């Protein structure tokens, strides 16, 4: 009994320390965040960007990346802005402000790279996959498995609740299948990460060398999937099916 | 008028002299006017293929009824009857008559052709008309006037009096006698700029314009016809020493819709030409050139001949409008325009209607002019506008006005201005784009007595619903930064951690394990019975086979043992009971209505025989053993059918 009490006490003390430590650091980044916001408000976007980037090194959050995106856009760097927005999107895929800004930004871009698949089923899956973060899908997958197990155990230990257990199992299997599909889709997307073009214009070649034939030109803010890389070059594929090698320095991975 | 009269008088005198001559001739001949003279004349002795000639058969002083000459078909020509004219003159108690049958012949084969001989019946006598020769050449319609004339007097019977040769009208209408000139007022125009196509008719003959036999081909153009009464103007001109009456018979304004070089087929004009004696030129042009047909005095020689006149194709070059300096809001109007604006009321109440009128007027293809768009007004409800177009072609120009009426209802009080409405057109005279504006209009709106406040305060009406409008987006910009950070960190992906996968695999294994356990635990007794019932038939068949083997080897004990095992085992498995419990009562009870009493009897007989065989130590009779085997086989077969697995 005494041991248990001591343990609880120790745990409480540790928790307090941790909370106080967190509380001590919070105002520090928060004040810098507010400072950056003030700079943004007064139109000093470059200063705001450097402040936000400083915080992002230690504490990358969705709101921070969102503000970084805004500041970059106001400073005229569309490529950087889209990069930051895409990063913020990975944590908050349903943020209305973020989605709106991405749409406004993409409307102003030069290259027409329409997303969306001709296949309705794929389009639905893609929509669902972009509604959840990968972590959410992974958690939901595990959650579905847990519920399935619970349903089976219910039927196993309580024969009178066999019907309920079967129902729970069926529902969880359906959700398991659905989330597996989304999980697979997201995995595939993460396997070939997105890159955003940061330079005003980049020429894509048919091989990782300037001597190769020119394939096409991409402009700032264009997004492409990185399929392969070789030293200073990355092999990118566009949504319209074109692919080519661009210099790795001209783009940045989300 | 004076000239006309002189002409008439002149002709009358001539006719009179002619009649006197005939009468003299008649008098000289002792046999009064019963003497008939028949003449056949062709208007041409030489003609090209496709050309036409007029054939006249003139019968003078015939006695009795003149039947139509029997012309029939003429070799090498298509013939059309032109009619029959008759004149009777009584002078000094003496009567003279003249009857003319006219035919139009169109040559359709080459060579020297003879027209005739024909027969004609006058009274009760038959007369024969001698043939005449005509040469049909392959040349195209010759340019020079055909002056050759072939008059053949044909007298087939000695009693017929032949009058002296004299001039008769020729019926040839030459291309130089009447022709049309089609011309554009300019060789080059811009797209949508008007070009005027004029048809000028030149004639030396008395001719009537009868419209178009074939309309001009004007696909790809916007056409405006000018009113005919404005176009026909008669003048006289002398060309190569010949006097022509010249008239513009038709004028068309053509608006090209696309650039290019166009060749336009001007179509075919239809005219009616009045032919008279050609030895008296004055009579042709002194009267009755256009508009009136025929003459109002007795004429021997007047004849109306239809004539189709075609003209050469005309070419028009259409240029694209210059790109240089083309304003963005240019909508294709070419010409010379002005813009006016009106409002019917400038002082209104909220809810009143105001009509705004935009008037585009000027010269050009006003029908296709696109009126400028009405500006968006937030403080007014604007209804769809109506457009009306008026076109005038009175001045031999296409001009007119387009009026666009827009009805607006002010939504709130205040002083509002309908901004100036810009309109851009291409000035075809100056060859530049010009922008003009409809002047702005100001409307003062007073708060209305029937405004919305009334409808809200009125207790009986409650809250009136308002017409919904889309929230209009005024501009597009990004949304503002986040003022606070809720701390949603960009986490590393948990799916990349082995622990996550280990946990999921563990869960999956647990699911399978417990599911398997739950399945196994289901109800073991039920399961065993189920399996027994399923497998019973197979076992029984196997044992029957064994029994059959014993039967062949003539081992009666082994046979009975196997067949008993097969039969009792089968029923026991099938009915879920022990082998010892198998009896006919149990079978009857368990099988119920599935087997018939007759089948039950056969099972009973089988069981009895088996009992006998096993316990009664019956003789090892092969026939009996075979019988038992057959019965066992049969019973298992029909029982399996009756009570399936």
Image (cartoon, rainbow, N blue to C red):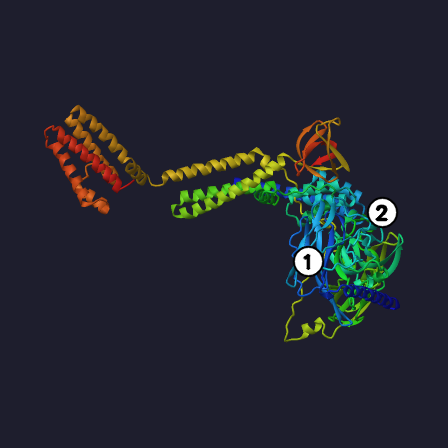
Q: Which residue is mark 2?
A: B324
- Residue A253, image x and y in percent? 69, 36
- Residue B510, image x and y in percent? 46, 37
Q: Which residue is mark 1?
A: B81
Q: Identify the residue shown where x is 74% and y is 71%.
A: B352
Q: Quadrant of residue B3?
A: bottom right
- Residue B453, image x and y in percent? 71, 72
Packing grade of label 2 (10 A; few <14, some 14-19, many >=20) is: few
User: Are dots 2 and 1 on a single chain?
Assistant: yes
Question: Is B85 on the left-hand or right-hand side of A127?
Answer: right
Q: What SS does tag 2 mark? A: loop
| Mark closest to the chain's N terminus, 2 or 1 | 1
Whether pointer 2 and pointer 1 mark residues with C-beta atoms closer than 8 Å, the reply is no
In the image, residue B462 above or below residue B196: below
- Residue A254, image x and y in percent? 68, 38
- Please tell me which residue lies in front, B416 or B278: B278
Quarter placement of the C terminus of chain B: top left
In the image, residue B51 above or below residue B401: above
Q: Identify the residue shown where x is 52% and y is 37%.
A: B504
Q: What SS does tag 1 mark? A: strand
In the image, residue B569 above or below residue B350: above
Q: CA distance from mark 2 to mark 1?
A: 65 Å
Q: Quadrant of residue A110?
A: top right
Quarter placement of the N terminus of chain B: bottom right
Question: Is B4 on the left-hand or right-hand side of B553?
Answer: right
- Please tell me which residue lies in front, B577 or A32: B577
The mark lying in front, picked from 2 and 1, is: 1
């Amino acid at each position: 009994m005494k041991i248990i009490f001591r343990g609880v006490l120790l745990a409480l003390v540790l928790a307090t320390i941790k909370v106080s430590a967190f509380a001590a650091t919070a105002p520090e980044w928060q004040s810098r965040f507010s400072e950056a916001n003030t700079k943004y408000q007064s139109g000093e976007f470059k200063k705001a960007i450097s402040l936000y980037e400083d915080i992002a090194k230690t504490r990358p959050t969705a709101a921070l990346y969102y503000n970084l995106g805004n500041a970059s856009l106001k400073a005229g760097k569309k490529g950087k802005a889209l990069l930051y927005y895409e990063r913020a999107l990975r944590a908050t895929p349903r943020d209305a402000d973020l989605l709106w800004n991405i749409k406004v930004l993409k409307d102003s871009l030069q290259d027409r790279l329409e997303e969306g698949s001709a296949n309705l089923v794929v389009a639905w899956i893609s929509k669902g996959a972009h509604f959840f973060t990968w972590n959410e899908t992974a958690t939901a997958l595990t959650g579905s498995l847990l519920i399935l197990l619970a349903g089976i155990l219910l039927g196993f230990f309580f024969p009178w609740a066999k019907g309920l257990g079967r129902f729970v199992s069926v529902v969880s299997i359906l959700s398991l299948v659905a989330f597996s599909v989304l999980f697979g889709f997201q995995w595939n997307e993460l396997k070939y990460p997105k890159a955003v073009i940061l330079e005003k214009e980049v020429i894509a070649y048919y091989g990782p060398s300037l001597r190769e034939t020119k394939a096409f030109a991409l402009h700032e803010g264009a997004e492409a999937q990185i399929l392969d890389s070789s030293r200073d070059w990355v092999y990118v594929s566009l949504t319209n099916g074109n692919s080519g090698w661009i210099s790795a320095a001209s783009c940045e991975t989300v | 008028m004076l000239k006309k009269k002189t002409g008439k008088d002149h002709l009358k005198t001539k006719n009179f002299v002619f009649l006197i001559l005939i009468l003299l001739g008649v008098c000289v001949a002792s046999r009064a006017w019963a003497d008939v003279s028949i003449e056949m004349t062709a208007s041409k002795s030489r003609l090209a293929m496709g050309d036409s000639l007029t054939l006249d058969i003139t019968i003078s002083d015939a006695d009795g009824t003149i039947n139509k000459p029997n012309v029939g078909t003429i070799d090498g020509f298509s013939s059309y009857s032109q009619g029959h004219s008759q004149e009777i003159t009584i002078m000094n108690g003496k009567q003279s008559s003249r009857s003319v049958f006219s035919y139009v012949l169109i040559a359709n084969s080459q060579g020297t052709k003879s027209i005739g001989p024909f027969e004609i019946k006058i009274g009760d006598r038959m007369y024969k008309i001698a043939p005449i020769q005509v040469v049909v050449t392959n040349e195209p319609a010759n340019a020079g006037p055909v002056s050759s004339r072939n008059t053949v007097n044909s007298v087939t019977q000695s009693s017929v009096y032949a009058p002296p040769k004299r001039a008769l009208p020729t019926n040839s209408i030459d291309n130089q006698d009447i022709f049309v000139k089609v011309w554009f007022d300019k060789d080059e125009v811009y797209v949508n700029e008007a070009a005027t196509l004029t048809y000028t008719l030149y004639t030396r003959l008395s001719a009537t314009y009868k419209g178009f036999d074939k309309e001009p081909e004007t696909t790809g153009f916007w056409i405006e016809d000018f009113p005919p009464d404005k176009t026909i103007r008669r003048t006289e001109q002398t060309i190569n020493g010949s006097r022509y009456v010249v008239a513009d018979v038709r004028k068309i304004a053509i608006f090209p819709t696309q650039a290019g070089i166009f060749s336009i087929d001007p179509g075919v004009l239809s005219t009616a030409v009045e032919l008279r004696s050609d030895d008296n030129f004055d009579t042709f042009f002194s009267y009755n050139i256009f508009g009136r047909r025929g003459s109002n005095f007795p004429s021997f020689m007047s004849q109306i001949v239809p004539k189709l006149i075609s003209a050469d194709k005309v070419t028009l070059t259409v240029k694209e409008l210059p790109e240089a300096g083309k304003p963005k809001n240019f909508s294709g109007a070419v010409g010379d325009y002005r813009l006016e604006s009106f409002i019917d009321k400038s002082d209104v109440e909220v809810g009143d209607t105001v009509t705004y009128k935009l008037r585009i007027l000027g010269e050009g293809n006003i029908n296709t002019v696109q009126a400028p768009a009405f500006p968006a007004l937030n403080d007014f409800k604007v209804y769809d506008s109506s457009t009306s177009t008026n076109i005038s072609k009175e001045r031999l120009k296409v001009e007119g006005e387009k009026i666009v009426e827009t009805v607006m209802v002010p939504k709130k009080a205040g002083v509002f201005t309908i901004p100036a409405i810009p309109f851009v057109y291409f000035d075809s005279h100056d060859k530049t784009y010009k922008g003009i504006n409809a002047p702005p209009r100001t409307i003062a709106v007073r708060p209305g007595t029937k405004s919305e406040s009334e409808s809200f305060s009125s207790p009986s009406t409650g809250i009136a619903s308002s017409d919904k409008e889309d929230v209009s987006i005024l501009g597009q910009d990004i949304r503002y930064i986040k003022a606070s950070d809720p701390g949603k960190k960009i986490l590393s992906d948990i799916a990349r951690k082995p622990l996550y996968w280990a946990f999921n695999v563990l869960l999956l294994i647990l699911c399978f394990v417990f599911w398997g356990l739950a399945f196994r635990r289901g109800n073991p007794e039920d399961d065993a019975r189920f399996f027994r019932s399923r497998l019973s038939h197979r076992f029984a068949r196997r044992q029957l086979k064994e029994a059959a083997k014993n039967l062949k080897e003539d081992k009666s004990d082994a046979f009975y043992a196997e067949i008993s095992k097969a039969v009792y085992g089968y029923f026991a498995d099938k009915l879920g009971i022990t082998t010892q419990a198998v009896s006919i009562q149990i079978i009857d009870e368990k099988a119920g209505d599935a087997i018939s009493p007759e089948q039950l009897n056969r099972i009973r007989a089988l069981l009895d025989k088996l009992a006998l065989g096993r316990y009664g130590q019956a003789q090892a009779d092969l026939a009996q053993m075979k019988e038992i085997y057959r019965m066992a086989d049969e019973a298992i077969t029909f029982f399996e059918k009756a009570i399936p697995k």
